[in-house]
Image (cartoon, grey):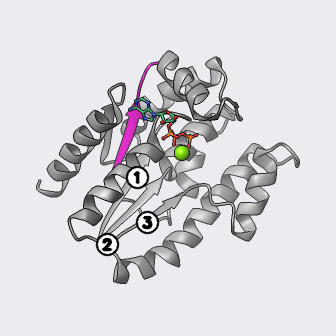
């Protein structure tokens, strides 16, 4: 089984890219499963969702613990099952996102990494990188609504912190995601092929 995480700022094109990767591998006869994090359809996910929607108030460390706890449950339950059933597991955000949004909320890198110790690591992470103006355009294109962290200052901070992830987590590939969806997909495929034929 290959386990690949796609991450990047809000609106950077993660879901668009994952759908292209999934279609490509399925057309080549592979079985592919895709999970979007944070999950909202689990008991912990419900707590995360109400907090992100600012309907409840959690300590920022508690929120990150919940987000990390849900990934730990997934990696010990669903992922173990997927290993038997699928050729490729794709995640839309994973531990890399905590390192960005946890730090925006004031947590230290050490605290975030400590809490993630028991989570199964993906083989590789593709992190989308692009200028803030392009991200803002894509967010407006997406649904004309903005969510938490989708203002210029937070996006700039997130872009910088995503760039820094490779200094803390192995097998992170930063990809310039300014191109068309097909171009970003082609670049990603190249990275995936390179990674697995090293
Ligand atoms: N390479 C690209 N070039 C131009 N537009 C793109 C590209 N990739 C995605 N888009 C468009 O940008 C918007 C955001 O893309 P997408 O929803 O895939 O991003 P995301 O990273 O999954 O966002 P979110 O964090 O909200 O889940 C969509 O309208 C999508 O069609
Ligand atoms: Mg998305």
- Name the image quarter holding residue 164: top left
Tell me if I can see residue 123 in this picture.
no
- Tell me where residue 76 appears, x and y as whole percent: 51, 76
Asked which secondary structure carries label 1, the reply is: helix
Which residue is painted at 34% across and 75% down in the image? 86
Q: Nearer the viewer, residue 160 or 128?
A: 128
Disc with the residue nearer the chain's start (1 vs 3): 1
Disc with the residue nearer the chain's start (3 vs 2): 2
Q: Nearer the viewer, residue 129 or 144?
A: 144
Marks 1/3 in contact by CB < 8 Å: the verdict is: no
Q: Which residue corresponds to mark 3?
A: 120
Which residue is painted at 63% across and 41% down in the image? 102
Q: Which mark is residue 31?
A: 2
Disc with the residue nearer the chain's start (1 vs 2): 1
Query: Residue 144 colored magenta?
Result: no
Q: Is residue 188 above or below residue 123?
A: above
In the picture provided, is 52 more to the left or to the right than 151? right
Point out the stretch of residues depicted in magenta: 123-131
Measure the alpha-carbon separation of dots 1 and 2.
13 Å
Tally of numbered tags: 3
Mark 1 within 8 Å of ligand 1, using the beta carbon: yes
Tell me if I can see residue 79 in this picture.
yes
Q: Nearer the viewer, residue 116 or 10?
A: 10
Q: Which residue corresponds to mark 1?
A: 19
Asked which secondary structure carries label 2, the reply is: loop
Label 2 packing within 10 angstroms: few (<14), some (14-19), many (20+): some
Marks 3/2 in contact by CB < 8 Å: the verdict is: no
Q: Nearer the viewer, residue 193 or 163?
A: 193
């Amino acid at each position: 089984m290959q386990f690949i995480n796609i991450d990047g700022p809000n609106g950077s094109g993660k879901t668009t890219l994952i759908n292209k990767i999934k279609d490509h591998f399925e057309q080549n006869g592979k079985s592919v499963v895709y999970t979007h994090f944070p999950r909202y359809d689990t008991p912990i996910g419900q707590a995360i969702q109400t907090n992100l929607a600012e309907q409840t108030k959690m300590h920022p460390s508690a929120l990150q613990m919940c987000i990390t706890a849900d990934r730990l449950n997934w990696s010990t339950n669903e992922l173990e099952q997927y290993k038997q059933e699928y050729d490729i597991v794709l995640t839309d955000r994973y531990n890399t996102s905590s390192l960005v949004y946890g730090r925006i909320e004031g947590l230290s890198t050490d605290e975030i990494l400590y809490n993630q110790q028991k989570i199964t690591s993906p083989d590789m992470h593709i992190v989308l990188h692009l200028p803030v103006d392009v991200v803002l355009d894509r967010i407006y294109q997406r649904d004309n609504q903005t969510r938490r962290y989708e203002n210029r200052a937070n996006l700039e901070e997130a872009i910088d912190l995503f760039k820094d992830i490779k200094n803390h987590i192995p097998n992170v590939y930063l990809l310039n995601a300014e191109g068309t969806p097909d171009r970003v997909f082609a670049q990603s495929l190249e990275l995936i092929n390179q990674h697995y034929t090293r």
